[in-house]
Image (cartoon, rainbow, N blue to C red):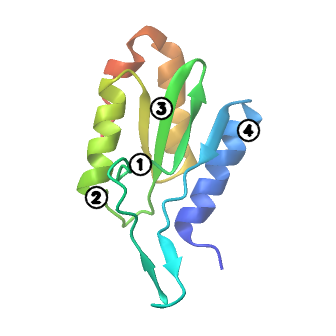
Amino acid sequence: MATPESIVRDSICEYLQLHKCFYFIHDSVGIFDPVKQRFRSNTNKHRMKGVADILGIWQGKPLAIEVKSARERLTPEQRLFLERFRAEGGISILARSIDDVEKALKLTNINNCLAAKTAIPF
């Protein structure tokens, strides 16, 4: 059964595909340990927590989209990732619907040279 978040994520991916955007879904699921019958976290020191669900390139700019349902909240790591991504010149979006992505990307198109500085609240 599809979750509200996965339905929104899939509609965002369809929108990006329609606009010929290069993107991919970043799965951050842990590694399943068949002996312990549970997921274990990856303790690699180079692994970053909070990486956005969808990463890509929108009109030459790095793009990060964190997808949340209406009731879900960003973790501190996710908030930090999106803030850092934007500070480094990328487009970062917290998306609760496809409308959030459309608005943010239209704003980016209108103000392309200011996209990294535009305040899109998390």
Of helix, strand and loop, which one carries label 3?
helix
Answer with mark 4 or mark 1, whichever residue precedes in sequence: 4
Of circles 4 and 1, the one toward us is 1
The type of residue carrying mark 3 is Ala
Q: Is residue 122 visible?
A: no
Of helix, strand and loop, which one carries label 2?
loop
- Judge by depth and name the residue closer to the eye, 108 or 24: 24
What's the residue at 60%, 19% (across, down)? 59
Q: Is residue 22 visible?
A: yes
Neighbor class of circle 2 (other Cα within 10 Å; few <14, some 14-19, many 20+) is few
Answer with mark 2 or mark 4, whichever residue precedes in sequence: 4
Residue, disc 1: 51
Q: Quadrant of the N terminus?
A: bottom right
Residue, disc 3: 104
Q: CA distance from mark 3 to mark 4?
A: 16 Å
Q: CA distance from mark 3 to mark 2?
A: 21 Å
The type of residue carrying mark 4 is Gln
Of circles 3 and 2, the one toward us is 2
Image location (x, y in percent) of residue 21: 68, 31
Residue, disc 2: 75
- In the picture, measured across the screen, residue 18 lies left or right of residue 33, that is right
Residue, disc 4: 17
Residue lying furthest left in this view?
76
Asked if labels 1 and 4 touch by Cβ distance under 8 angstroms, the answer is no
